[in-house]
Amino acid sequence: MEKELFEIYQRNFPLIVRDENTVRRILSDENNRIIEERDARHKLIGAAVVNKDALLLFCVDAKYRNRGIGSRLLESAEQLVKDCGYDRLIVGAGFDYITPGVPTSKRWFASENEALNPGLDETASDFFTKRGYIHAWECNCFDMKCLLTHFAKGSPQVGDVVEGITYRWAVLDDLEQVCACTDDAYSDFTEYYRQEGLYHTDSPTRVLIAVLGEEVVGTLIVTVGDERQKLGSVGCTTVRTAFRGRHIAVNLVIAANGYLEKKGMKEAYLSYTYSGLDHMYGYAGYQICIYYMMAEKIL
């Protein structure tokens, strides 16, 4: 079943950038409840994957849309969630996420540095809006990307010192200082920085830090993608509260861009972020490529 679910995900979400192993792990979670629609030949043509109060995957193959299949799947998902004792259904991020919300070209609040993926429209968000769902955030949610061939030549580079702050790779001995920084800045990110594999020099995913004296004042997780896609990523940016306003976050991202470009990456990606950060990441060449409706409905 996981294989079929992954294949229907691939057919229906061509614009989504998500690690294949992560998607497969989510789709095979033991707590998933799967509602399916099949054609006369028993091929999976529509699916809803529910986990607790979250709709992790929801799609109908293009050929079979506008026939009521999506409405039936959603009604069944809502009833399943109610039967499990929940009073709301959220679409997207639950215990983990395949997409943070419903992919769309629609923005709910003002934004900047926008260059949406061709082919993106409001069809999916309109579907949920017509059925009583609202965008539950008081800001936009979106992904961003950067063409490294245009924006990887800036300063600083990894190893540089700017205004007394050193931008370098973290090693395992830095872990507690790194987590002290993330606890101060945004504690929800700390768990991601506690993975010891991020501090190995041969890891494709590493922690870039900004250091003043003995204190870590900024952090960023940087990932080199595979040779086929040539797509790197950055994320989980943090800066200690007392050091904000000094372009530390921007400098971290610019240094990461240069590193990714040297590793052969053509683009860099930033997922699941929100209003305000479009301005900051814009300094480093990132543009919004897809919005998400953080859809929610009280049942």
Image: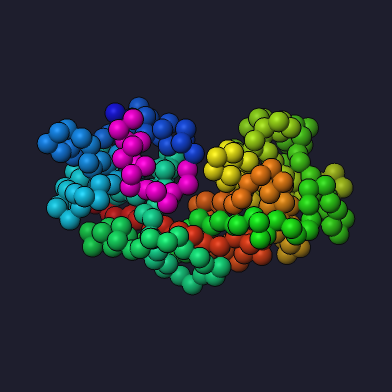
Q: How many marks?
A: 0
Most distant residue in the front direction? 228
Q: Name the residue at 74% across, 32% down.
A: 201
Q: In which quarter of the image is residue 287?
A: bottom right
Residue 14 belongs to magenta span? yes
Q: In which quarter of the image is residue 228?
A: top right
**294 w.r.t. 225: above or below:** below
Q: Name the residue at 12% across, 36% down.
A: 40
- Residue 169 can be seen, yes or no: yes
Instruction: Please state the horizontal and vertical placement of residue 32, each as a whole percent of the image.
Output: 32, 33
**Magenta stretch: dominant secondary structure:** helix
**132 w.r.t. 167: above or below:** below
- Residue 36 can be seen, yes or no: no
Q: Name the residue at 38% across, 55% down.
A: 103
- From the viewer's perspective, tell me whether residue 245 is left or right of residue 186: right
Instruction: Please state the horizontal and vertical placement of residue 279, each as a whole percent of the image.
Output: 60, 66
> Which quadrant of the figure contains the N terminus?
top left
- From the viewer's perspective, tell me whether residue 61 is left or right of residue 257: left
Q: Name the residue at 43% across, 43% down.
A: 97
Q: What stretch is highlighted in magenta?
A: 3-18
